[in-house]
Image (cartoon, coloured by chain):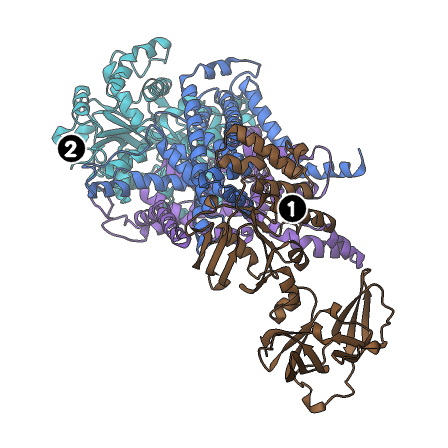
Chain colours: A blue, B purple, C brown, D cyan
């Protein structure tokens, strides 16, 4: 190993080294607890019983599919809203700076606050219902709070995450030269063809990054779920915390949920990114 | 098709939508926060019967909100500083050195971003238990620092890579010592990156829910624990409205600040992807 | 094989007038160059023809068809970008086929088209590569081939050679002209390089500050520029303000800062006070052996600087006060001009030396510009 | 229950070293306790509800003795966990800990607490040391009485139509679907309601003594059937407070609630004064909370003095007035209560803690996530 390489590795220690140790220890902690070690309430020995107990739990599979659904829909919806806006904001125009700041505002509103504002807005005597009643659309307010499909959570996820996707995609779209899109135009490509064949493939990396980050965030969501989520199904993070607090073997059981949550987030987001890549490549080739 | 005209139309549409999704909810929260404690806003009143600032006074004087703000706004700069300091050497290596395994190292540095935050928080608190670390402040500080180092690394390694070798060479050629080199070649390029990462981590730290909530509970109140208490468990609409509004104000200033520093920067700088 | 008719076109960006009252008639199959300094509006004009930039007023017909509201993808034009604008995520073959695919050509036709184009631009062996893997010259060919592939009536070139080195530039320039002659498309070519413009074009359009200064054949533009801008921009020129004193047939006597000069011109000056010009290569050092007809202008100068360029020698001259000069007719307004002279081969004259210079009166022309 | 047993084992090992504080207190006269308390200067009270309002209430204590009261914002479970996790440390953070009466069954008070308080407090004979069926043996003293019941909006249901029995509720649910709400987590009033239904549907279990065996739990199946048949006729809310907020908004006619929650929300102007509260004849549980001093309390004298103030007749009356809680000092009266003496007879005991927890869990599994 030469001197410069050695120097580089030494420089990595305080930052990257810390990250590796921290994440490694935490994941090991979760893994160890899931198979019975660090048991705070019983004997710490190797056992599969927590895995068996959790995997047999009806709640877990519901939470799993629910979180998967929320994460996938939120990620896809966020980028679908962000794309047109990013394209529109590609060239600066009067007020575009203001508009893009406005669109980014939700990034700085705390998730719980957003959830509260939303619930306040759609509650039985909230603004939306009052408008509906006043317009004569309904005779009695509709009950929309904590809807059992998780629509509220998805709306909140999109509201909060779309600006993030927008940030990523605006950067990517702006880095495509105008000449490239002009060339496509010149060669006879209409707006949709240009989007599918030029812009999507050239912004694929940013798109995947946005999808992955939103998916992981939404799959591990707790704050939207507890305020605006359905009552009759938990998200994985909610289940994890509830099991940890309510069960005698809480730590060990929640460790299994934690590992499942981690796997869901990683594999799910990777799959989503991969599928997106395939779809876009197929679209560009066609 | 007239482009400016279409633009104006879409602008109006977007601003209108933002009003519905941003201004309206906040105005409603404002309305709720002004409900006079002596005259509850209840069915079938369409509007609150009496408005007063009493709730703001009550919340500020009787809850631990001031303490939570103090804790959070004390933690945030510490976290920002620690993260940036720890990230600097790594960022330098990423930005200015070539070494085997650099790409893998850069990918690994994103790990904290892809592990769900509540998993990190829960098992970090379990780790603190095992290690016997009782200081909540220290616990949150360590946890958040590690969680936010990736952001600092990404922003700063771009900054480091933007430093031009010619300028370093020219400074040395003209007789500048290490300090002069740092001042003329490094500092001007690093400064916006340093500021951007500090502000960004500051905001993230105040926003961060999982670690602050799980590690801090029950007695180390921070902004997120207060929020959880008022928006989740003890959900009373008027109080929730006051707390939400009080906590949004500093964020607006922080946003304006960040806008200034991040304006011209590519988003790849922030996220390290794309 | 498409003509372009541009009639009183204006393009404004906010308060900035990018194109002012442009009228231009381009015949089918001609090679037209838009020449001018940067910012003169030549690229804007090209993009207006391509349809990227909308007209603020005026009208434009391509192939006899009104282009109002016709988007770029519907026009019979193909553009070769200065930056090449290759699609980095597509292979060379897919870059070349991008246009034909949009035109919904059958697979069969696409394949033959690809073979044709690839051989025309000599890229047959590079088809599976991606643009970033190619050299600058190869990328340029892909850009050219991609535009050719849609068999457009009009090819638009936006300084396509500016990113190539000098040698390559010459050969590609030649290839483009060859292709144009073979295929017969109308070519509109933007450049700021006057040599390129003169070398390639049937017609040169000289532009300045958003307006057209002169339209003409390379010969016209070079030898009969209408004003100081064109004279100066295309090639080097010695330009002097002159006051017409008297006329004998086509021979004029004018007063300049160098003293009185004789100008032989079939075209009358547009005003008493106008400009005269001659090219540096239209004068020589042999003032001592002037022809006896008395129609040559001879004056004495000192050589300030001398540059040997291989095929020619260029000198900068400082004219000395004229011995026969009539002091009160000298144009006081002008400070003493310096004169450029270019002669073939190596010249013996030295810096600081005083020489007699000869400019034949038939080599001096009036510019159609008064002062 | 984070580290329950671990802490217990550690606690038993170390308690010998931390057992002096109680000896010190028991050797002091009351004026000495007051003087020592003033010297300590601070008392930290871990109470999991109404922290903000208690900060106002304790002002009179602070002003009288010059001792600062700190009330952290922890939740019930978090406070309990902290108490257990800290029990091994020589000095902890908690001076006074509030818990539900039945929580005392989870640990051995004499090993982890200072006391018995009944020997240390001057007004010992007017106080209660037994709560929700658990005898603290004098180590924990009641300071808060609360009653679950149903809060209703008189403009949507009149007093005479209020459902009283199981069949009344069945009939009301069928006739007015979606007008009744209760929670299943974040607050105990919802669980109190469904436990009450469970007891009425399955009456042949002794809920005070039965253990949550498989056999007992199997017997409860008809109760889950009762709820599942009526799914959609009642609404599950997010929390106690959510129930009340939505009752106030006109969404519900009735919600499960606490007497003290209803009263204090009205007092604070968060809900309409028109909202009323009743205990149905099918009975709903009432209970209370107790305070105690951990062995490793940093300010034991101040803690004792604070408990003395907290349980005094005067403070208890104030709480009754401000919060609607039931006074726990026999010397204080309760005219500010929301329900009259006759109706108070409908109050029942909570089921035994393990069974109660098992019922809640089974309700979540069989009804909520059904």
At mark 2, the secondary structure is: loop
Q: Is residue A194 in sight in this rendering?
A: yes
| Image position of B217 with respect to B267: above or below | above
User: As drawn, is C136 to the left or to the right of B227?
Assistant: right
* C104, C128: nearer the viewer: C104
For the residues tagged 1 and 2, is the chain the same?
A: no
| 1 vs 2, front mark | 1
Task: Name above or below for residue A94 compared with residue D361.
Answer: below
- Please state the total of marks drawn on the protein image: 2
The quarter of the picture where residue B150 lies is top right
Q: Mark 2 = which residue?
A: D157
**Which residue is located at x 77 percent, y 36 percent?**
A6
Considering only vertical position in the picture, is C179 above or below A66? Answer: below
Tell which residue pokes out farthest to the top in this image.
Answer: D215
Please state if D284 lies on the left or on the right of A169 as rendered.
Answer: left
Q: Residues within 10 Å of mark 2 (few under 14, many from 20)?
A: some
* Mark 1 and mark 2: Cα distance apart in space: 95 Å
The residue sitting at 63% across, 77% down in the picture is C275
Residue at the extreme left: D160
Residue at 63 percent of width and 71 percent of height: C228
Q: Locate residue A181, reporting x and y percent.
A: 52, 44
The residue carrying mark 1 is: C178
Residue B230, image x and y in percent? Answer: 38, 40
Mark number displayed over residue B184 = none
């Amino acid at each position: 190993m030469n001197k410069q390489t050695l120097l580089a590795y030494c420089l990595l220690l305080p930052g990257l080294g810390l990250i590796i140790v921290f994440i490694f220890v935490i994941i090991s902690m979760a893994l160890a607890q899931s198979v019975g070690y660090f048991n705070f309430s019983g004997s710490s020995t190797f056992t599969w019983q927590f895995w068996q107990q959790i995997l047999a739990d009806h709640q877990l599979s519901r939470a799993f599919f629910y979180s998967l659904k929320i994460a996938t829909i939120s990620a896809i919806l966020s980028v679908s809203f962000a794309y047109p806006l990013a394209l529109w904001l590609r060239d600066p125009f009067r007020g575009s700076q203001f508009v893009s700041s406005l669109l980014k505002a939700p990034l700085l509103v705390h998730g719980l606050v957003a959830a509260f504002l939303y619930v306040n807005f759609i509650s039985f005597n909230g603004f939306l219902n009052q408008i509906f009643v006043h317009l004569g659309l309904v005779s009695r307010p509709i009950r929309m709070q904590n809807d059992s499909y998780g629509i509220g959570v998805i709306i909140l996820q999109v509201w909060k995450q779309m600006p993030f996707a927008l940030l990523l995609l605006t950067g990517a779209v702006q880095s495509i030269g105008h000449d490239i899109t002009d060339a496509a135009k010149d060669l006879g490509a209409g707006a949709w063809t240009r989007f599918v064949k030029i812009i999507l493939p050239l912004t694929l990396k940013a798109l995947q990054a946005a999808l992955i980050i939103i998916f992981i965030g939404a799959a591990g969501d707790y704050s939207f779920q507890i305020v605006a989520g359905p009552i009759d199904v938990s998200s994985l993070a909610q289940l994890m915390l509830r099991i940890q607090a309510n069960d005698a073997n809480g730590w060990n059981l929640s460790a299994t949920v934690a590992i499942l949550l981690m796997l869901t987030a990683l594999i799910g987001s990777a799959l989503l990114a991969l599928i997106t890549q395939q779809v876009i490549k197929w679209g560009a080739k066609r | 098709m007239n482009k400016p005209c279409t633009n104006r139309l879409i602008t109006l549409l977007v601003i209108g939508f933002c009003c519905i999704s941003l201004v309206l909810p906040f105005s409603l929260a404002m309305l709720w926060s002004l409900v006079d404690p002596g005259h509850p806003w209840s069915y079938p009143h369409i509007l609150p019967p009496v408005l007063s600032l009493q709730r703001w006074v009550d919340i500020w004087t009787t809850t631990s909100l001031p303490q939570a703000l103090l804790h959070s706004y004390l933690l945030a700069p510490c976290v920002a500083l620690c993260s940036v300091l720890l990230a600097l050497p790594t960022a330098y290596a990423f930005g200015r050195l070539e070494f085997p395994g650099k790409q893998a190292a850069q990918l690994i540095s994103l790990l904290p971003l892809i592990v769900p935050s509540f998993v990190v928080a829960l098992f970090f608190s379990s780790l603190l238990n095992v290690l016997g670390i009782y200081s909540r402040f220290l616990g949150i500080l360590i946890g958040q620092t590690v969680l936010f180092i990736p952001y600092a690394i990404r922003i700063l390694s771009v900054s480091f890579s933007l430093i031009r070798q010619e300028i370093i060479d020219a400074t040395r050629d003209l007789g500048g010592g290490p300090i002069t080199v740092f001042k003329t070649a490094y500092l001007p390029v690093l400064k916006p990156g340093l500021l951007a990462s500090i502000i960004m981590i500051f905001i993230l730290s105040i926003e961060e829910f999982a670690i602050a909530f799980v590690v801090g509970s029950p007695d180390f109140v921070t902004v997120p624990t207060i929020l959880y208490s008022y928006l989740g468990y003890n959900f009373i609409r008027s109080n929730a409205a006051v707390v939400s509004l009080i906590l949004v104000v500093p964020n607006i200033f922080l946003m304006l600040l960040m806008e200034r520093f991040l304006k011209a920067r590519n988003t790849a700088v922030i996220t390290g992807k794309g | 094989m498409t003509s372009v008719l541009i009639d009183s076109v204006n393009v404004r960006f906010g308060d900035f007038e990018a194109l002012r009252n442009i009228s231009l008639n381009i015949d089918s199959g001609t090679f037209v160059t838009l020449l001018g300094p940067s910012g003169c509006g030549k690229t804007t004009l090209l993009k207006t023809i391509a349809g990227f930039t909308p007209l603020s007023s005026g009208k434009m017909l391509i192939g006899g068809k009104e282009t109002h509201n016709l988007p770029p993808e519907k026009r019979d034009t193909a553009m070769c970008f200065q930056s090449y604008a290759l699609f980095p995520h597509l292979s060379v073959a897919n870059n070349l086929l991008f246009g034909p695919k949009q035109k919904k050509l059958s697979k069969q036709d696409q394949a033959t088209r690809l073979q044709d184009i690839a051989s025309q631009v000599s890229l047959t062996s590079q088809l599976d590569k991606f643009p970033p893997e190619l050299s600058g010259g190869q990328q340029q060919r892909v850009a050219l081939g991609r535009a050719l592939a849609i068999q457009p009536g009009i090819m638009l070139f936006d300084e396509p050679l500016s990113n190539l080195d000098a040698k390559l530039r010459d050969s590609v320039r030649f290839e483009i002209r060859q292709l144009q002659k073979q295929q017969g498309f109308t070519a509109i070519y933007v450049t700021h390089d006057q040599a390129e413009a003169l070398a390639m074009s049937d017609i040169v359009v000289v532009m300045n500050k958003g307006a057209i200064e002169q339209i003409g054949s390379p010969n016209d533009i070079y030898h009969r520029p209408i004003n100081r801008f064109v004279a100066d921009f295309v090639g080097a020129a010695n330009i002097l303000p002159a006051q017409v004193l008297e006329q004998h047939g086509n021979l004029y006597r004018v007063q300049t800062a160098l003293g009185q000069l004789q100008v032989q011109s079939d075209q009358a000056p547009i005003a008493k006070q106008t400009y005269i010009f001659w090219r540096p290569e239209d004068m020589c050092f042999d003032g001592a052996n002037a022809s006896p007809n008395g129609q040559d202008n001879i004056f004495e100068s000192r050589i300030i600087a001398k540059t040997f360029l291989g095929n020619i020698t260029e000198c900068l001259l400082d004219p000395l006060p004229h011995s026969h000069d009539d002091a009160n007719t000298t144009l006081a307004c002008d400070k003493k001009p310096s004169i450029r002279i270019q002669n073939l081969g190596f010249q013996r004259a030295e810096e600081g030396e005083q020489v007699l210079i000869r400019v034949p009166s038939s080599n001096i022309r009036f510019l159609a510009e008064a002062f | 229950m984070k580290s329950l047993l671990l802490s217990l084992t550690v606690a038993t090992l170390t308690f010998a070293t931390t057992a002096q504080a109680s000896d010190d207190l028991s050797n002091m006269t009351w004026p000495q306790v007051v003087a020592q308390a003033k010297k300590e200067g601070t008392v930290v009270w871990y109470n999991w509800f109404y922290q903000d309002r208690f900060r106002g209430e304790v002002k009179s204590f602070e002003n009288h003795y010059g001792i600062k009261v700190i009330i952290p914002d922890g939740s019930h479970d978090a406070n309990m966990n902290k108490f257990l996790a800290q029990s091994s440390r020589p000095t902890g953070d908690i001076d006074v800990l509030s818990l539900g009466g039945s929580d005392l069954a989870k640990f051995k008070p004499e090993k982890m607490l200072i006391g018995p308080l009944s020997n240390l407090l001057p007004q010992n004979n007017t106080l209660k040391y037994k709560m929700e069926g658990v005898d603290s043996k004098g180590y924990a003293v009641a300071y808060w009485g609360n009653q679950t019941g149903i809060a209703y909006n008189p403009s949507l249901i009149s007093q005479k139509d209020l459902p009283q029995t199981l069949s009344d509720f069945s009939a009301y649910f069928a006739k007015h679907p979606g007008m009744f709400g209760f929670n299943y987590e974040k607050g105990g009033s919802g669980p109190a309601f469904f436990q009450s239904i469970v007891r009425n549907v399955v009456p042949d279990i002794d809920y005070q003594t039965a253990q949550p065996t498989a056999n007992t739990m199997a017997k409860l199946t008809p109760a889950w059937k009762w709820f599942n048949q009526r799914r959609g006729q009642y609404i599950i809310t997010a929390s106690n407070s959510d129930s009340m907020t939505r009752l106030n908004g006109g969404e519900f006619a009735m919600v499960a609630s606490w007497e003290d929650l209803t009263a204090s929300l009205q007092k604070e102007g968060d809900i309409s004064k028109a909202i009323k509260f009743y205990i149905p004849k099918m009975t709903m549980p009432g209970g209370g909370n107790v305070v105690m001093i951990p062995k490793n309390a940093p300010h034991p004298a101040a803690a004792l003095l604070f408990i003395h103030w907290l349980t005094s007749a005067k403070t208890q009356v104030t709480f009754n007035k401000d919060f609607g809680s039931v006074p726990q000092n026999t010397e204080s009266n309760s005219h500010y209560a929301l329900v009259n003496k006759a109706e108070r007879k409908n109050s029942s005991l909570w089921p035994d803690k393990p069974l109660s927890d098992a019922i809640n869990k089974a309700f979540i599994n069989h009804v909520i996530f059904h």
